Amino acid sequence: MPTGGRVKSIMSDNNLVIGVDIGGTKIAVSLLDEKKNILCESIELTPKTNLFEPNRDSEIILGFVISLIEKIFSVSKVNPSDVGGIGIGVAGTVDFEEGKVIFSPNLPFREFDFKEAIRTHFKVPVFLDNDANVAAWGEKCYGAGRDASEIVCVTIGTGIGGGLILNDEVYRGSIGCASEIGHMVIDINGPKCSCGNYGCFEAMAAGPAIARKAREAVFGSPDTLILKIAGGEMDNVNGEVLMSAAAEGDELAIGVLQEVGEIVGVAFANLVNIFNPELIIVGGGVAESGGLVLEHAEKIVKERAIKPNSEIVKIVKAKLGNKAGVIGAAALIEKEIKKRCG
């Protein structure tokens, strides 16, 4: 909890904003100043919900987010009227202008008017966007993309999200639903995705897919270090265990990560061919846990993307880490209010 002097400095700032990052695993809420320094934050596990009960369980998530925002106001001794707005990034397809979550594979939202519910409760300006869009904007303004105008930002975690910065602006497409990079089909005969399609990038290279590939590999080689690190329990085999085994030189683990890197590389090569970006910024667990996947992906991009696109693009790790969502959501408020005020 902030000290008395810290509270005074927070309350004297007229440019405070709330940033919210809603993911399938965790929800983060932060109070930030005008330079997007985090002054106070709360990070909690996303409540377990039933995707087949969207009406009921959307309200559960909404209520949980409201409680976290209220907690931030209480701890920081800041009132809703003291903040310039609330920016929200949510994992899923978002109608930016309407502020609705159209669909989320890993959350129960279906045509859910999240923006209006938050605005009505706190009576401040609210802006809602896809979580990868706000992360991309955060990296553009305050992270790895400061010096670039054409950026593809990819987050590989529980799912795979993407954000595009084209000509220094977030690109949302004709109806605001662009950048669903995780649902780009890599293999038409691939595994079923949570969206209902087959062979999506997400279904083949996100955290659950990496864990599945690791378990499949272990079945054929029970003496691998992967299983030893997992305590001999197949259910404990996940991406983190796989990367730990690879770091210790386990050939099976290295092979699985190279396979994932090839899938990531093919996806990136497609993006390089289509958008000709200066940077591909990669965040999420894959970027944070080790370089083997990205090293192999970069090799595949050089081999498969067309020249000169493949020669100028750089693949870099995100700088903001797991704070990109809340920082980007906060930066979104500033951008949109300036736009609306001329």
Image: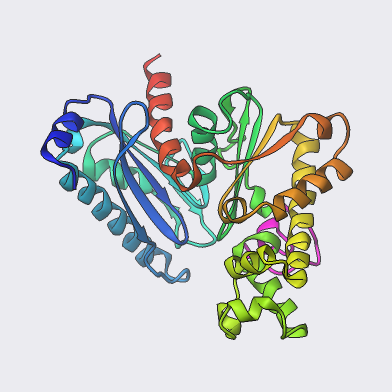
| Colour mode of the rendering | rainbow
Give the residue at x 53% y 39%. Answer: 319
Q: Residue furthest left?
A: 4
Give the residue at x 64% y 64%. Answer: 243
Q: Nearer the viewer, residue 146 or 48?
A: 146
Q: Using the image, determine if residue 198 lies above or below residue 82.
A: below
Residue 194 visible, this orientation: no
Q: Nearer the viewer, residue 153 or 41?
A: 41
Give the residue at x 73% y 53%. Answer: 264
The reply to whether the magenta stretch includes residue 191 is: yes
Q: Using the image, determine if residue 24 lies above or below residue 135.
A: below
Q: Is residue 271 left or right of 290 when viewed as pictured?
A: right
Q: Main secondary structure of the magenta part?
A: loop
- Residue range in magenta is 184-203
Q: Is residue 61 left or right of 315 when viewed as pictured?
A: left
Q: Using the image, determine if residue 236 lies above or below residue 333.
A: below
Q: Could you tell me residue 285's position as x and y percent?
A: 57, 56
Q: Could you tell me residue 223's position as x and y percent?
A: 72, 84
Q: Could you tell me residue 250's position as x and y percent?
A: 73, 70
The reply to whether the magenta stretch includes residue 11 is: no
Q: Nearer the viewer, residue 67 or 75?
A: 75
Q: Could you tell me residue 190's position as x and y percent?
A: 77, 66
User: Which quadrant of the view contains residue 136?
Assistant: top right
